[in-house]
């Protein structure tokens, strides 16, 4: 991958990518390992590409089993070291008010904590589990007693006590003319082919968390497509053909 071209193509993340590149160069030069803040999937992708072909080891921790945001350990050799991440369990009576991911995140941000210091927030019917950098966990526990109108209690738990991430999807079957990126985006959001093509051309679509402005790019089963202003979905599988020979595909929209 041409690092400079990638950065220029994803200009909104330019500062983050340059910082990650600097960290890798510093670790390679000094042999001093370093942890990052929580990285989004596209930032993890970039970091992996930067490390390719170099004597750099990357390890991630972001949750139990599957996760999106993760802290990276960048080192010159394999290391068995504890990540500086705490897990906070939120408990309360949610019978009368159902809290969303946005509610939990908004409360954390209102404390002045930057988004990159917070990892995944896994929301369940009986509360949530928040992954956060250790430097901020006590501050959060001592300063949050209510989220929206619901009183809550917070406590630290171990990774063994944590639950696996729960992804909630809305399944949708759509008919498309091809597996081109613009066709899949159009079908997923009931847009015209021209509208879907424009979203891709204008840099509003990411494929597997990486900006892709190639309208004709073929989408594969298991790919995750993010569309600015619309959300994201998993391209699950091709189900077959209609009588008119259009493709029948299953997508799963993230809620």
Image (tube, rainbow, N blue to C red):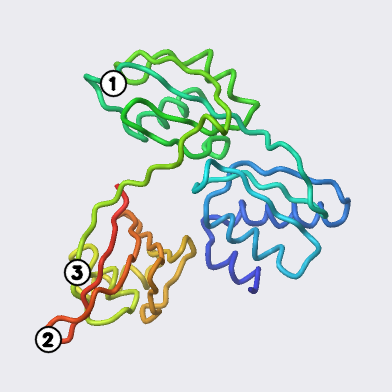
Residue at left offset 41%, top offset 66%: 223
Q: Residue furthest left?
A: 243
Nearer to me, 156 or 133: 156
Where is residue 59 shown, x and y percent of the image?
A: 68, 51
Work out whether mark 3 precedes mark 2 in sequence or the reverse, and give the earlier one: 3
Say what secondary structure mark 2 lies in.
loop
Work out whether mark 3 precedes mark 1 in sequence or the reverse, and give the earlier one: 1
Badge 2: residue crowd in 10 Å (few <14, some 14–19, many ≥20): few
Say what secondary structure mark 3 lies in.
strand
Residue at left offset 53%, top offset 34%: 131
- Placement of the N terminus among the 4 image quadrants: bottom right
Nearer to me, 23 or 4: 23
- Check the image and report above or below for 230 versus 137: below
| Disc number placed over residue 244 in the picture, else none | 2
The CA distance from mark 3 to mark 1 is 36 Å
The CA distance from mark 3 to mark 2 is 14 Å
The answer to whether residue 12 is left or right of residue 203 is: right
Badge 1: residue crowd in 10 Å (few <14, some 14–19, many ≥20): some
Q: Name the residue beneath numbered marker 1.
A: 94
Q: Quadrant of residue 229?
A: bottom left
Where is residue 102 shown, x and y percent of the image?
A: 36, 34
């Amino acid at each position: 991958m041409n690092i400079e071209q990638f950065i220029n193509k994803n200009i909104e993340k330019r500062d983050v990518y340059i910082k990650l590149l600097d960290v890798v160069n510093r670790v390679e030069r000094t042999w001093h390992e370093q942890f990052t803040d929580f990285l989004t999937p596209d930032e993890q992708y970039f970091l992996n590409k930067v490390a390719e072909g170099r004597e750099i080891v990357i390890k991630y921790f972001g949750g139990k089993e599957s996760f999106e945001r993760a802290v990276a350990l960048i080192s010159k050799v394999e290391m068995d070291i504890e990540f500086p991440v705490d897990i906070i369990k939120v408990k309360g009576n949610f019978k009368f008010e159902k809290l969303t991911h946005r509610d939990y995140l908004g409360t954390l941000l209102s404390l002045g904590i930057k988004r990159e210091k917070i990892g995944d927030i896994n929301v369940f019917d009986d509360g949530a589990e928040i992954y956060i950098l250790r430097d901020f966990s006590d501050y959060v526990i001592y300063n949050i007693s209510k989220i929206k109108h619901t009183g809550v209690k917070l406590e630290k738990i171990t990774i063994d006590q944590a639950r696996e991430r729960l992804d909630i999807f809305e399944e949708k079957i759509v008919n498309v003319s091809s597996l081109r990126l613009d066709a899949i985006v159009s079908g997923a959001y009931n847009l015209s082919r021209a509208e879907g093509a424009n979203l891709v051309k204008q840099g509003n679509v990411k494929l597997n968390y990486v900006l892709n402005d190639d309208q004709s790019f073929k989408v594969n089963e298991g790919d995750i497509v993010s569309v600015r202003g619309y959300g994201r979905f998993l391209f699950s599988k091709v189900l077959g053909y209609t009588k008119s020979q259009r493709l029948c595909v299953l997508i799963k929209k993230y809620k």
